[in-house]
Image: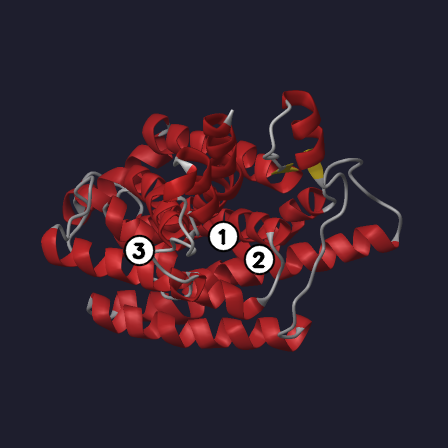
Amino acid sequence: MDFLNAIVLLLNYIFVPALSYGSQLALGAIFVSLIYGILRFAYFTAGDLMSFGTMFAVLFTWYFQSIGINFGILPTALLAIPFAIIITISFTLVTDKLVFSYYRMKKSPPVMLAMVSIGTMFVTQAIVRIIIGPFDRRFFDGERFILKANEFKEMTGLNEGLTIKSTQAITLVVTIIVVSVLFWFLNKTKTGKSMRAYSDNEDLALLSGIDPKKVVMITWIIAAVLATIGGTLYGLDKSFKPFTYFNNMLPIFAAAIVGGIGNPFGAFLGGYVIAFSEILLTYAYRKFFVYILPESMEPNSLIQLLSTDYKFAVSFSILVVVLLFRPSGIFKGKVL
């Protein structure tokens, strides 16, 4: 029984949270990877674009709630996401038209475009904070838990309970659906194949008659969709605070680079690598070892490799190691 309690403990505090967090990072890493692969620059506005999309999901959610519209046991935010996506798409296309297209026309180097994206990052931050403020916002409604710890204990007779929040399940299901549709689009449709060809060899793609303006537009649309969905799922699971999304830029980039920057599938897996690494290295294992070790060997300390304050240091360390020893990533993307 103690061994089963230890397994449930790890499921409750490591596996389930990491699976949810990894899904949210994966969505962000995929669009960062797509932008790098197709537009040829590091998009540092990623975290704040997620914040921008989530902000409008929050605003529409509040509006729906104020007029009595809800989604039953599911969060009302799921109804708000399509409206937030439309606004975020408009924002990315306008930003590209007013800012990035100029530098593409001038054939500016990728470093220049990356620096410009830092500028758009601060502008996006300012817009979000002016509209909704810098404070913590909660917008979740509906049924909070699929499985509660007490219910699990009663069903199994174990000392440890397993809790599964509805937002965790929604995050996983939505991520699987969105990523499946995206990969089908990239691999099976004419437009998706054109994007892949443009990413592999821009000059050859242009000679083949591929419209670069269309490829760029579709890339920004996909980025806006993934940013809004990923950001909203993160906000539902935790809470919406703009500065938190800015901080998430580091693990998102780490996930994209670990998987292979420019490789969407690698970025998808990279999200889970980063999430599991962060949680595994910052979890306190004392209770786990109490279950599996004899009483005479039970630890007195937390048995924690790193404090949770150093969670982002894990992402940064992984990022540095990958760039030093395998800059193309696990799945051999483009070298930064």
Residue 150 showing in the rendered view: yes
Q: How many marks?
A: 3
Q: Residue furthest front?
A: 296
Judging depth in this view, the residue of 147 and 117 nearest the camera is 147
The mark closer to the camera, 2 or 3, is 3
Q: Are marks 2 and 1 in contact (CB under 8 Å)?
A: yes
Residue 115 to residue 193: above or below:
below
| Residue at x-position 60% and y-position 54% | 238
Return the mark for residue 254.
3
Horizontal and vertical percent position of residue 225: 51, 47
Judging depth in this view, the residue of 289 and 264 nearest the camera is 289
Q: Label 1, secondary structure: give it.
A: helix
Instruction: Characterize the local packing of mark 1: few (<14), some (14-19) or many (20 or more) Cα atoms within 10 angstroms.
Output: many
Horizontal and vertical percent position of residue 247: 44, 66
Q: Residue furthest right?
A: 68
Q: Where, quadrant-wise, is the C terminus in this rendering?
A: bottom left
Q: Label 3, secondary structure: give it.
A: helix
Q: Which residue is mark 2?
A: 53
Return the mark for residue 227.
1
Q: Is residue 187 left or right of residue 66?
A: left
Q: Name the kind of residue labelled 1 in the image.
A: Ala
